[in-house]
Amino acid sequence: MGTSKTDLSVSFCPICRGAIDTLDKNPDITSVRIVSETEARLHVVGENGFLVPRSPQWDRHRSVMRRDEFAPAYKPFNLDVLRHALWVERGPAYMGDKVQPVIEHKITGLDIDDEDDFEIAKALIALTPRPNFLVPFVHDPIG
């Protein structure tokens, strides 16, 4: 049966065939999102100006916790494949509540928010020879 291709929308980057096929073959999934693993041990600056652990998993009786003591955390990349009807129907909650993650390498989670981030990305692109882990993610310009 499947979903008609006109029922799918892609935002923010080129179409990922695997994500579209996943959504097409699984009618219960509301959307597919590319994610990469990120740090779970985040803190925020509290109202009193001091650091406060963000996660309820943080043991308040300990100053330091190992990364492996937390459930994996993920941050979204810039590819969302979703059902267009949900976008129209749900507005800002368009992803729905059954979002299938596609977990990619953490290098895909590099955000460019400022000049420093741009310089880091530029340095990674310029690396020659490229480390093996980087080869699938950095492509030389065509032509």
Image: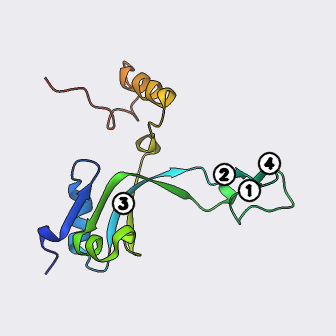
Q: Residue at x 29, y 77 (%)?
A: 89
The first of marks 2 and 3 along the sequence is 3
Numbered disc in front, either 4 or 2: 4
Q: Are marks 4 and 1 in contact (CB under 8 Å)?
A: no
Looking at the rendered structure, the secondary structure element under dot 4 is: loop
Residue 121 at what x, y percent from top left? 42, 29
Mark before the other along the chain sequence, 3 or 4: 3
Instruction: Kindly identify the amino acid type of the residue bearing the numbered disc 4.
Output: Gly
Few, some or many C-alpha atoms within 10 Å of disc 4 (few <14, some 14-19, many ≥20)? few
Real-space CA distance between mark 1 and mark 3, rounded to the nearest whole angstrom: 27 Å
Q: Position of residue 113 (x, y in %)?
A: 47, 37
For the residues bearing labels 2 and 1, Cβ distance under 8 angstroms: yes
Q: Give the CA distance from mark 3 to mark 4.
A: 35 Å
Counting residues from the start of the chain, the first of labels 1 and 3 encountered is 3
Vertical position of residue 42 compared to residue 55: above or below: above
Kindly identify which residue carries mark 4.
49
Q: Are marks 2 and 3 in contact (CB under 8 Å)?
A: no
Mark pair 2, 1: CA separation = 6 Å
Query: Where 74 sits versus 94, above or below?
Result: above
Q: Which residue is mark 1?
A: 53
Mark 4 vs 2, N-terminal side = 2
How many other residues sit within 10 Å of disc 3, few (<14), some (14-19) or many (≥20)? Answer: many
Alpha carbon separation for disc pair 2 and 3: 22 Å
Contact? badges 3 and 4 (CB < 8 Å): no
To which quarter of the image does residue 68 belong? bottom right
Identify the residue position indicated by label 2 in the image. Answer: 42
Q: Nearer the viewer, mark 3 or mark 4?
A: 4
